Amino acid sequence: MCGIVAYIGFRDAWPIVINGLKRLEYRGYDSTGIAIINQVGFSIYKKIGKVSSLEAFTETEDKSGHVAIGHTRWATHGAPSDVNSHPHTSNDNRLHIIHNGIIENYATLKEELINRGHRFKSETDTEVLIHLIEEIQNIEQTDLMEAVRLALNTVIGAYAIVILDRENPGQLVAARKGSPLVIGVGKGEYFIASDATPIIAYTKNVIYLKDNEIALIKRDELLVGYSGEVDQ
């Protein structure tokens, strides 16, 4: 299994996410990664090994920011390595994703994307998904939530995902099918995790996303919709 922790709100995001990942260590993992964004920049840190290894690796870094996504990975597609660790990034370096689950048709999708000019850094199915979302958003000229919905109707498999957009840092998009995802609701803040363990220290108000649900999460707003096919 893998672990997801994300935060958007008014608190320092790093300690919430790093401590949340520690609470998910029981799920098993081989690498850790966190992406964090603030008003002046963006940073992504990935390291093979324990959460403590990532902590040591980033000890002297400026990790300030109020929006972050974090992940512990158990290798499926691609060996344990820094580059295969999450978060993964779109072709234009704008979108960043953390993902639990398996995209079964990733090899076919990857070949199609490569033929259309995409270049991949990792061996993972997750990177394929974020490239697909980017491409759909560019082609359809739609917002991120709709691009995610369209992409998820293309993939086969199970997923729990959280996506951060560097150009729209005030929002996260999350979705799930066959892999759990929980949203903790606070006052002017939201917490997202694979289970409630990283969240309960901050809020007892939690929402368990259902299969095929997608959520747009802002500091003061939560919209939940259906990610399946829309009847014409």
Image (cartoon, grey):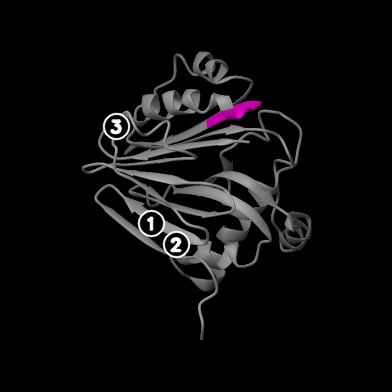
Nearest the viewer among 171 and 188 is 188
Instruction: Write down the residue under mark 3.
Output: 202
Measuring from the top left, give residue 22's x and y in whole percent. Answer: 49, 23
SS under mark 1: strand
Mark 2 or mark 1, which is nearer the start of the sequence?
2
SS under mark 2: helix
Instruction: Write down the residue under mark 1.
Output: 216
Measuring from the top left, give residue 75's x and y in whole percent. Answer: 71, 34
Give yes or no for residue 28 being in the magenta stretch: yes
Residue 95 at least partly seen: no
Q: Give the spatial CA distance, label 1 vs label 3.
A: 20 Å
Neighbour tally class for label 2: few under 14, some 14-19, many 20 plus, Cα within 10 Å: many
Dividing the picture into quarters, in which one does residue 150 lie? bottom right
Residue closest to the far left:
187
Q: Amino acid at mark 2?
A: Met
Mark 3 or mark 1, which is nearer the start of the sequence?
3
Neighbour tally class for label 1: few under 14, some 14-19, many 20 plus, Cα within 10 Å: some
In the figure, 53 relative to 175: above or below? above
Instruction: Write down the residue under mark 2.
Output: 145
Residue range highlighted in magenta? 27-33
Q: Amino acid at mark 1?
A: Leu
